[in-house]
Image (tube, grey):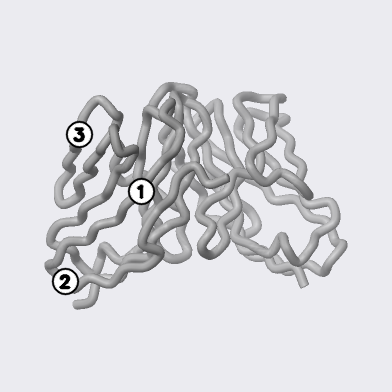
Amino acid sequence: NAGVTQTPKFRVLKTGQSMTLLCAQDMNHEYMYWYRQDPGMGLRLIHYSVGEGTTAKGEVPDGYNVSRLKKQNFLLGLESAAPSQTSVYFCASSYSGSKNIQYFGAGTRLSVL
Amino acid sequence: QQQVKQSPQSLIVQKGGISIINCAYENTAFDYFPWYQQFPGKGPALLIAIRPDVSEKKEGRFTISFNKSAKQFSLHIMDSQPGDSATYFCAASKGAQKLVFGQGTRLTINP
């Protein structure tokens, strides 16, 4: 049982380049999330989705776009990467029940030069 | 706007000692308070969680203490072991809504 899988694991971009991070979950979860983790800042929510075809902004959405075309996949896009987007990105998923137990992927380490 | 404040940022404890990490929240509507544990190179994983109708929850060596009037909760790790060395995040949410995470505490247990 794979759980939450993120690809790629590492990526280096030049300023202005674009890329898409892929998150896939095999637990039939309704909710999916994208976070960024920076030293001393904890986990900050970028965008999230409460179901297929729906997305919503989190705490730090600027510079990112997302899509949830299939229930099991949640894509995070950077249209024009900036050095401030250098971070570790985590995807998570959860059931729609009240406990809000989130299951995280292993992360994508992104450097923007 | 940091709704959940966590301290300390880093903590060093001797093997066998008690590790204590504290969190304070602002939103009185929060009704679910989990702690996540993250090892290097891995994603966070749920460790233990509590709801505000109880003041303490214990699972093995891990205990959450909850003070509703002070809007604070803490994680206690008894008999701390080197394998407990990790980053710990507290979080809070209202129902099934999105979690708000604290800043994280890097815990090191010296052998």
Q: Which residue is mark 2?
A: B15
Looking at the rendered structure, the kind of residue marked 1 is Cys
Question: How far is the residue under mark 2 from the one under mark 3?
Answer: 27 Å
Which-is-in-front pick, marks 1 and 2? 1
Between residues B2 and A95, which one lies in front from this camera angle?
Answer: B2
**What element does badge 2 sit on?**
loop
- The spot of residue A92 in percent (x, y) is 53, 42
Q: How many marks?
A: 3
* In this rendering, position of residue A27 left or right of residue A10: left
- Chain for disc number 2: B
**Whether labels 1 and 2 share one chain:** yes
Q: Position of residue B105 (x, y in %)?
A: 38, 61
Dot 1 crowding, Cα within 10 Å, few <14, some 14–19, many 20+: many
The residue to which callout 1 is attached is B23
Dot 3: element: loop
Type of amino acid under label 2: Lys
Q: Is residue A49 left or right of residue A64?
A: left
Residue A100 in the image: above or below residue A66: above
What residue is shown with label 3? B55
Q: Work out whether residue B108 or residue A91 is closer to the camera in this orientation and state it.
A: B108
Question: Which residue is depicted at the point 71% across and 25% down?
Answer: A53
Q: Are marks 1 and 3 on the same chain?
A: yes
Q: Which chain's residue wears label 3?
A: B
Earlier in the chain: of badge 1 and badge 3, it is 1
Disc 1, SS: strand
Q: Residue at x 68, y 64 (%)?
A: A86
* Residue at position x 35%, y 45% in the image: B35
Instruction: Give the crowd class for mark 2: few <14, some 14-19, many >=20 residues within 10 Å.
Output: some
